[in-house]
Amino acid sequence: MVASRHHRKRRDIEIARRRIHRPGRRNAGLRLRRTRSSLESRRHRISRRISARPPGKSDRVRFLITAGPTREPLDPVRYLSNRSSGKMGYAIAEATLEAGHEVVLISGPVGINRPRGAAVIPISTSDEMFDAVHQQARNCDILVMCAAVADYKPAKVSKSKIKKRDGNLSFDLIPTRDILASLPKNRKYIVVGFAAETENVETNALEKLREKNCDIVVANDVSRADSGMESDENEVTILFRGGEIKKISRAPKKIVARELIKIFANVCEKRLTKKIA
């Protein structure tokens, strides 16, 4: 009897010890629920950071946005430029600020009031745009290249005004530096390129997406009179690295900008969630 009681006592002690040092299914389930709860909580914080007005400065997404045209000087009074008004880029900047995020806006010469709350860096030439983007991109989460940067510039800039004379005038043009192509491939930030096309919009945009190593390309048909350059409205096609294509029907640029920010935010959220998963 004594030996039997002693044996049962030792057995009970051993069982208790195992329960302490090796949690059973109930404790394992509790740990799993806590892990899932912690992951969902982190995902919720990321979603709130991206999609809604963040509670504090540290939770804001940092957008670097380019807008407007560039001007490539030919002489002290003339330059080569394009019809970009900057309205789309400025609308994107305003929509980003409305969502509560940080905005650095690199802007070419435009006749638009600066978005209140944005840090604006004014530039004129493609070289100035190139340098500003590379200086600021290292600090951003998303780079939105909406500016219409000149593809060519005069090979030589006259120091004095070129006088009108009889006969033709000719000058050489050289390619400007390609900002998108110059960005590092192993970057940490998302890159959104814009493609202003007059024909084969999706085909040309897809080529730009692949060749320029963009995450997203937003394309529009600038040959239309009812949208695009200088217009208050736009209609765009969005192409993604993974092959997905979305369209936003013609609407005021401010409305289009809000829809674009939702799309950009979703891509950013997925990338951040993947990092912590």
Image (cartoon, rainbow, N blue to C red):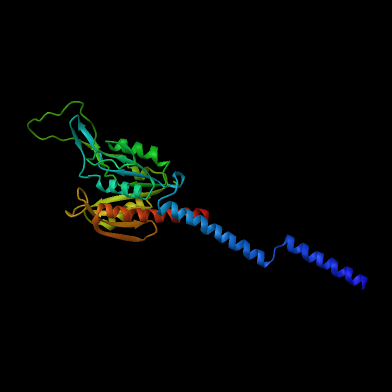
Query: Total of numbered circles in the picture?
Result: 0
Q: Position of residue 140 (x, y in %)?
A: 41, 44
Left or right? Give the position of 24 relative to 175: right
- Residue 97: percent from left, percent from top: 35, 47
Q: Of all residues shown, which one is farthest toward the right?
A: 2
Occupied quadrant, residue 177: top left
Asked if residue 169 lies left or right of residue 269, the reply is left
In the image, 228 versus 9, the foreground residue is 9
Q: Residue at 29% of width from left, 60% of height from top?
A: 247
Side of 210 where 234 appears, left or right: left
Residue at the bottom extreme, as displayed: 1
User: Nearest the camera: 245 or 261?
Assistant: 261
Q: Quadrant of residue 13?
A: bottom right
Q: Residue at x 52, y 59 (%)?
A: 40
Name the one closer to the observer, 159 or 265: 265
Where is residue 219 drawn, in percent x and y? Answer: 28, 54
Q: Nearer the viewer, residue 243 or 270?
A: 270
Picture quarter with the N terminus: bottom right
Residue at 15% from the left image edge and 35% from the top image edge: 170
In the rendered image, the vertical position of residue 67 relative to residue 26, given as above or below: above
Horizontal side of 241 relative to 167 (left or right) equals right
Looking at this view, name the residue that lies furthest to the left.
166
Q: Residue furthest front?
A: 55
Q: Is residue 77 above or below residue 277?
A: above
Coordinates of residue 121 in the picture (x, y in percent): 32, 37
246 shown above or below 195: below
